[in-house]
Image (cartoon, rainbow, N blue to C red):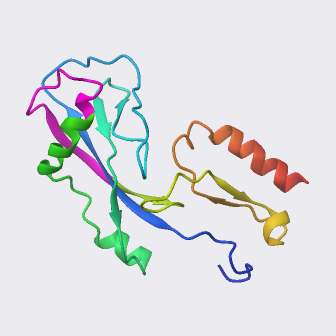
Amino acid sequence: MKGLPDGIIPASHYARGCYFTLSNTKSPFKHLIYPIPEVGGLGVHVTLDLNGQVKFGPDVEWIKGIDDIPSFLNMFDYSVREDRANQFYPAIRKYYPSLKDGSLEPGYAGIRPKLSGPEEGPTDFVVQGEDIHGISGLVNLFGIESPGLTSSMAIAEHVAAKLLK
């Protein structure tokens, strides 16, 4: 961004993440399950949508060489290849050992901007106000990953406090 001092905007890393859905069976889960986090993400975890559909994911596939983000996002393939399920089965069976072969269907994929890259530890949210960059009325938010949505009201209160100082 023009006008910001050097070093204010953190480096961006991008990870593609896929989800698979559980098919042909009633949900064996009544709540979310998060395995021990792995490098780059929270691990392949269980999410239940509003209809009770079980979703497993996301995995982490690092994307390199993004120079022009708008062009990249317009040409990116968001489909989920069926063969990626081969990486999901062992991860899911750590907490759901009775998962049957062939019970995963491709769901959806997305791209997550991240503050930490491959082989780096997780980085927490970055909230920058005038005290950091010197521009009145500007609050930058970087790296709002999970549990960012859950934390959104607390983050909003923090941003409002920065703006009302």
Q: Is residue 119 above or below residue 50?
A: below
Q: Residue furthest left?
A: 102
Q: In the visual, does 115 lie left or right of 9?
A: left
Which quarter of the picture shows residue 142?
A: bottom right
Asked if residue 72 is among those painted magenta in the image, a careful observer would answer no
Q: Residue at x 85, y 64 (%)?
A: 131
Q: Which quarter shows the C terminus?
A: bottom right
Image location of residue 67, percent across then percent down: 42, 81
Q: Is residue 51 above or below residue 8?
A: above
Image location of residue 102, percent across then percent down: 8, 34
Q: In the visual, does 62 lie left or right of 26?
A: right
Question: Which one is nearer the viewer's eye here, 72 or 28?
Answer: 28
Which quarter of the picture shows residue 72?
A: bottom left
| Number of numbered tags placed on the structure image | 0
Q: Residue furthest right?
A: 165
Image location of residue 147, percent across then percent down: 54, 40
Which quarter of the picture shows residue 33?
A: top left
Q: Residue furthest bottom?
A: 2
Q: Which quarter shows the N terminus?
A: bottom right
Q: In the visual, does 73 lie left or right of 82?
A: right
Q: Residue at x 15, y 53 (%)?
A: 81
Question: Which one is nearer the viewer's eye here, 53 or 115?
Answer: 115
Q: Residue at x 32, y 18 (%)?
A: 29
Question: Which one is nearer the viewer's eye here, 158 or 164?
Answer: 158
Q: Residue at x 41, y 31 (%)?
A: 34
The magenta segment is 92-109
Asked if residue 94 is among those painted magenta in the image, a careful observer would answer yes
Q: Is residue 72 above or below residue 116?
A: below
Image location of residue 139, percent across then percent down: 74, 61
